[in-house]
Image (cartoon, rainbow, N blue to C red):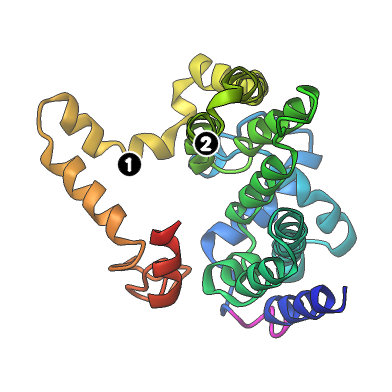
Amino acid sequence: MWLATAVLLLAASFRLVALRDVPPGLSQDEVFDAGMPAHILAGNHALFFREGYGHEPLYHYWGIPFYLALGENYLQARLASVFLGMLLVAATMRWARREFGTITAVTAGLGLAVCWWSVIFSRVGIRPIMEPLFLVGVAWFWPRLQDRLSKGVVAGLLLGLSLYTYTAAQVMFAWPLLFTAVLLITQRAQWKAVLARGGVVLGTAVLVALPLYLTWWADPSLLQRVDQLGGPLDALRQGNVQPIAAAALATLGVFSFSGDPRGTYGLLGQPLFDGLTAVLFYAG
């Protein structure tokens, strides 16, 4: 209890101290996101907003109470992310303690409390910090063999809702497939139960996410950002694999060898993991 409280206080200090000044000024994305609650309160509701080159809605609805309480300013823009970042640290520690014990929970909490990416996305008022919180919920509710299948509905609900937080969350549909594959190897004797639980999670997630996909299907012009970044895929369709191969190599390198050359939300060229955390990542 005391260790968890200390970790949360540490996390709060990394997220709240000098919140107005670090990072300096509101980015263009923050200014846009800060204005979305007012846009929604004016009667503009959507499963996917066309504004801002296309935005999923949940983060903007989450920001409404902060807008109503604080008005439209830097504090309103960033506190919504601060709260999500704190919830992420707390939820991760709670899940890790249940699965692996106190030492692992505190270690995970400390890592999230002070690591660059967790801190920076908790200090800027943009959407990405919401997605991992839903994924911790999926891990918490993933049904074990002794659990009822209905528990998988909750996990699937959270997985499906995660797609309404940020565009990159779509890759998380691979999670139930990969995790079920691992369980089929480690728990072969109970393969029917493993498949049933994975199927419930994935099936529920698909149903929850279906309205979003139908919205995109009905109006493909909503996916402006995807179209902007689709050059390598367009080249691949024409038989040119070089652009997508280069993009894939650059993406793989970001884990420990290279970083974003722009430095909008990170240090120039900083990889996702440093030496120690990269070793832990590659070790699984």
Whole-percent x, y for residue 227 in the image = 35, 34
Q: Is-magenta flag for residue 116?
A: no
The numbered dot on residue 186 is: 2
Near mark 2 (Cα within 10 A), the count class, few <14, some 14-19 or many ≥20, is few
Quadrant for residue 12, please give it.
Answer: bottom right
| Residue at numbered disc 1 | 229
Residue at position x 61%, y 57% in the image: 126
- The correct choice, above or below, for 280 with respect to 233 in the image is below
The residue stretch that appears in magenta: 17-22
Give the structural element (helix, strand or loop) at label 1: loop
Q: Is residue 167 left or right of residue 104?
A: left
Among numbered discs 1 and 2, the one appearing first in the sequence = 2
Residue at position x 66%, y 24% in the image: 197
Three-letter code, disc 2:
Thr
Three-letter code, disc 1:
Leu
Quadrant for residue 57, please give it.
Answer: top right
